[in-house]
Amino acid sequence: MTKTKAKAKPTRNSTMKKPARRAATAGAVNVKQVAPNSPKKVHAKQPTASELPAATAPSASAGSKQSRVLAMLRMINGATIEDIMRATSWQQHSVRGFFAGVVRKKLNLDLASEIIGGTRRYRINGQTTVGGTNKPARAA
């Protein structure tokens, strides 16, 4: 007895027609058929804070949590993460994210950290204020 060869299954190649796909709903229309030459919307790129001049840089509204944190960071002694957590009811990782994303990247401010008396304090270098007021610190 001899073995019979199994018939080869037909394979799909470029000469065979693919079955047409049906739309999910009866009233579905191909967008390309409706408006093939429609103009594409082009959105202007928004400039980042570092690209804006200093006068037009975005700032926090008065009384917001962001403005309170920035005022704390501008004081001579700066602020600890715990101080900011109490003032804003943020969690520690949110405060650190604010430092990295807003203070350093968005506002492009120089944030310094130093250990004073065993605690790490953060402050913005440059303009400093005394006790949370907008008066500049005296040069000693």
Image (cartoon, helix red, strand yellow):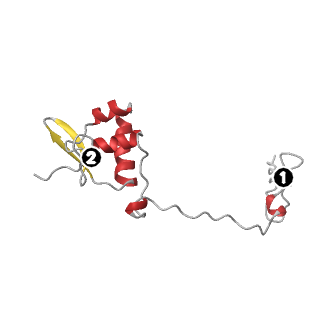
Q: Which residue is mark 1?
A: 21
Q: Mark 2, residues whose alpha carbon is within 10 Å: few (<14), some, or many (≥20)?
A: many
Q: Which label lies toward us, 1 or 2?
A: 2
The percent position of residue 15, horizontal first and vertical second, equals: 83, 65
Amino acid on which disc 2 is placed:
Arg
> Which residue appears at 79% of the width and 65% of the height?
14
Q: Secondary structure at mark 2?
A: helix
Q: Is residue 128 left or right of residue 139?
A: right
Q: Secondary structure at mark 1?
A: loop
Q: Is residue 101 left or right of residue 16?
A: left
- Work out whether 15 lies above or below 118: below
Q: Nearer the viewer, residue 110 or 66?
A: 66
Task: Point out the tag, 1 or 2, that comes first from the N-terminus.
Answer: 1
Q: Nearer the viewer, residue 110 or 8?
A: 110
> Which residue appears at 31% of the width and 54% of the height?
109
User: Label for residue 74?
Assistant: 2
> Which residue appears at 17% of the width and 41% of the height?
115
